[in-house]
Amino acid sequence: MCFTKKAKNSLRERSKVTPAPSESCESSKETSRLSSKRQAEKNGGTGLATTTPLAQTPGVAAGKGVNQKAMVVVKPWVQRTLDMGVPALVDEFRGLARYTPEGMTTEAFNANKNKNRYQDVPCQDKGRIVLKFPGLQSDYIHANYLGTAHNPKKFICAQGPLENTQHSFWAMALQEKVECIIMLCNCIEMAKIKCHQYWPLEKDQKLVFGKAPNQITVTNMGARKMSPEEQCINVTSLKVDWVEGSRTIQHLQWENWPDRGVPQTNLTAINLLSATRGNQNPILVHCSAGIGRTGTIVAIAYVQDKMMAGEDCMAMNELLKELRSHRPWSIQNEFQYLYLHRVLLSYFLERHKDAYEELLIGENGRKYKKWVEDYATATGSNLQK
């Protein structure tokens, strides 16, 4: 049974009680990993996969069926999520909606106000990217490392570049040896500028940032859709030249994730993360403020990685604290928190139904159906497989 109209309105009202910072809210099997060298040659010099390496995600082991270590933690996590239901998860998030790390300092953020897109979304000093690239006037950029269980620098979470931070953004990408940029917003949304156009849109077009001899030149080498199934993700191959050499960086833009909302598809996030899984260097992720949509996609990878390692993920509220200890305000509202759960439920109970079908027997099957209905009502979405 879905939320009643009264309950739905109540949920919407509850979201108003804990407002996020003003304008910054943001809202086929494969049994082995492709050779990174060969794949790099096919994809412009990076490890970007063109298929979805399901074998590298929780609960699926290459050529060996189900990853038993992951199943041990996946099953109780699914049970907890179904037992709690959507309203309880909303309340769980609300209990931490304003949580920030104890002792957080923001000295660099405070000293560089003109380089911050939103003055109410601080960049903490701990784990911030310190720029050492030659030719820059400052070592500051609004970006932090956010690691996973296996890689303390797996992701860099950043705000969308301003016109005056484009050079710093590309300097960061080169300094950190980034091979893949994930962009989760559009440059303009609802008639408001969310991100500066920091990469060339047309094939063979060039953009130059900074001054000689430390200028950075970015050239569009061509674009494609990530896959026939994922037409909302545009992949652009960018050649980046600077005084010390040249590098190809893949730019993946998810074009229809609404600000302050959730996408209309529940497995695109998994497919996007799977396509970048072969990257050994940090993956640079940004939206507008670099906390809402960015925090959500990184949280999916964060939980997946812990599950793959057999680590307990039952206390999702504590995991949210862990995320925010690296990038404060990550996951900005209850809808994004619900989406995190929806994506993982869909991955386990739909894409890998055979492995986890016992979890949908009897009462659990009814709980899952209700969970999905309540999710659609709460978020205003109509998710389909």
Image (spheres, grey):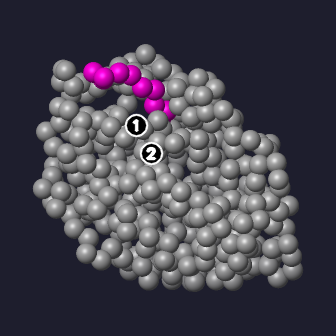
Q: Which residue corresponds to the image point at 44% horizontal and 83% vertical from the top-left?
A: 95
Specify the label residue 242 is tagged with: none
- 207 shown above or below 260: above
Q: Residues within 10 Å of mark 2 (few under 14, many from 20)?
A: many
Name the side, left or right, on which 38 lies relative to 173: right
State the SS at label 1: loop
> Mark 2 and mark 1 in contact (Cβ < 8 Å)?
yes
Q: Which residue is mark 2?
A: 282
Query: First in sequence: mark 1 or mark 2?
Result: 1
Image coordinates of residue 318 in percent, x first then y, are 48, 77
Q: Where on the picture, by quarter, is residue 321?
A: bottom left
- The CA span between labels 1 and 2 is 7 Å
Above or below — where is 288 with respect to 119? above
What span is colored magenta in the figure? 242-251
Q: How many marks?
A: 2
Give the number of the disc on residue 177.
1
Q: Residue furthest top?
A: 204
Q: Is residue 254 or residue 358 the one in the foreground?
A: 358
**Is residue 275 in view from this perspective?**
yes
Q: Amino acid at mark 1?
A: Lys
Q: Residue at x 58, y 48 (%)?
A: 273
Looking at the picture, how far across and down is residue 176, in whole percent? Answer: 37, 41
